[in-house]
Amino acid sequence: MSNEFTVDAALLRPFAPPPRLLMGPGPITVDPRVLRAMSAQLVGQYDPAMTQCMNDTMALYRAVFKTNNRWTLLVDGTSRAGIEAVLVSLVEPGDKILVPIFGRFGHLLCEIAERAGAEVHRIERPWGEVFTTEEIEQAIRQVQPKVLAIVQGDTSTTLLQPLEHLGAICARYGVLFYSDATASIGGNPFETDAWQLDAVSVGLQKCLGGPSGSAPLTLSEKAVERIRQRRHVEAGIRTAQHQVGSGRRIASNYFDLGMIMDYWGEERLNHHTEATTMLYGARECARILLEEGVDQSIERHRLHGRAMAESLAAMNLQLFGDQRYKMHNVVGVYIPDGIAGEAVRSSMLNDFGIEIGTSFGPLHGKIWRIGTMGYNARKDAVLQTLAALEAVLRRAGHAMSANAGVDRALAVYAETADIR
Ligand SMILES: *Cc1c(COP(=O)(O)O)cnc(C)c1O
């Protein structure tokens, strides 16, 4: 017998991740309660306990999204699976879609919409700025799109696009309103129904404190109607009773939201095998958020984000972007002149076990991004990060007064002692 396929003995040891504090733009350190929930044993796909868990998860996410939308469910995959499911299901080839871009994820929406065959119309803002409502309304008037797709919080720039007035405008022009709120939900105000959104998709790995791999999303009745027109039931499970839509079949099987709704709905029509472990994780993320209270969680993110940003400024660092529109849960900070940004990040990681973020696109090599989100939107995590960053920066020759960052953060916490 040949030993050709034996592996090195080292590979047979289990993977032991080093202890880390993940203070970048995501993923972040997972809440231990979520890890515990995800270690539970599987139940069968149609076990009543499983379908109950799915229904409960739908109800929990309605509260997370602040919506009464019946169709609030999970797509199995990372956040972009949710984006792709929404776009491929809502737009047919040739449909016009308007995408205002103010960072990397706006470009991702365009890329995905283009692959779905949409006629994509872009408007752009320099990284570090957001759009006014009037700019978006004017573009809607000009383009007359079927769908407006826009990111709420774009971690690439750390800025938050105001969305609250766009829903009424979209309704007036007969446009479906979709937002990717992956990075912002749970840490910044978000109101699906009050803001009249037709589709929203998110992920777990930002303010929800989970791992990536599940994409909760919600659909309005208008969005569902559009999708139902394209309903398709696979041969092999289709019966004479099934009615299919007259519209063009959705181009993706895995991301066909019509089929995914049929699976999450009463009929439980077979589609994929639900990623049960991710379901447990997603359910626990929502449970933890709602146990704290969505508004309390947003306040907590506001507090720790403010403590981090003000303290960085006190360390003689310059913050990136229009601070009026900063996301609560992540801050961009310029790498000071003469400081090697990647050397600082690697000392943070290797000497202190703390990860902070780099940047891409036009900001590559210019800013670091530091997150305070989910499980890590905590006083001790903020103080440890500031103390470590100060030590690393002072060794690298950055001028600042001793303890400036930690002192500033402690002052913020002393002022707001009533919020944890
Ligand atoms: C972080 C982030 C994502 C992540 O997408 P994945 O597929 O989970 O990597 C998506 N959208 C936005 C706006 C984000 O900030």
Image (cartoon, rainbow, N blue to C red):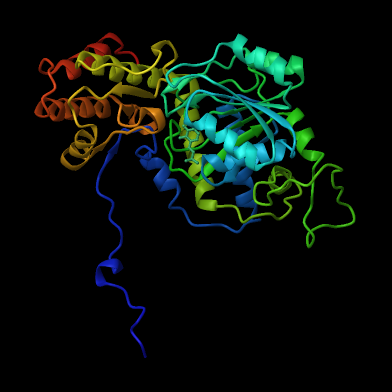
Q: Residue at x 43, y 30 (%)?
A: 207
On the question of residue 183 being in view, the answer is yes
Q: Nearer the viewer, residue 86 or 42?
A: 86
Q: Nearer the viewer, residue 156 or 214?
A: 156
Which quadrant is the C terminus positioned in?
Answer: top left
Horizontal side of 129 relative to 378 (left or right) equals right
The total of numbered circles placed on residues is: 0
Q: Residue at x 28, y 14 (%)?
A: 310
Q: Quadrant of residue 362?
A: top left
Q: Position of residue 19 (x, y in %)?
A: 25, 45
Residue at the limit of the structure toward the right, as seen here: 240
Q: Position of residue 418 (x, y in %)?
A: 33, 13
Is residue 48 shown above or below 227? below
Q: Nearer the viewer, residue 206 or 149?
A: 149
Q: Quadrant of residue 99?
A: top right
Horizontal side of 277 relative to 382 (left or right) equals right
Is residue 148 shown above or below 33? above
Q: Position of residue 338 (x, y in %)?
A: 17, 25
On the question of residue 182 being in view, the answer is no
Horizontal side of 266 relative to 50 (left or right) equals right
Q: Position of residue 253 (x, y in %)?
A: 69, 52
Q: Residue at x 41, y 23 (%)?
A: 158
Is residue 133 shown above or below 176? above
Q: Residue at x 34, y 23 (%)?
A: 332
Horizontal side of 267 relative to 327 (left or right) equals right
Q: Nearer the viewer, residue 361 or 176?
A: 361
Which quadrant is the N terminus positioned in?
Answer: bottom left
Is residue 130 shown above or below 18? above
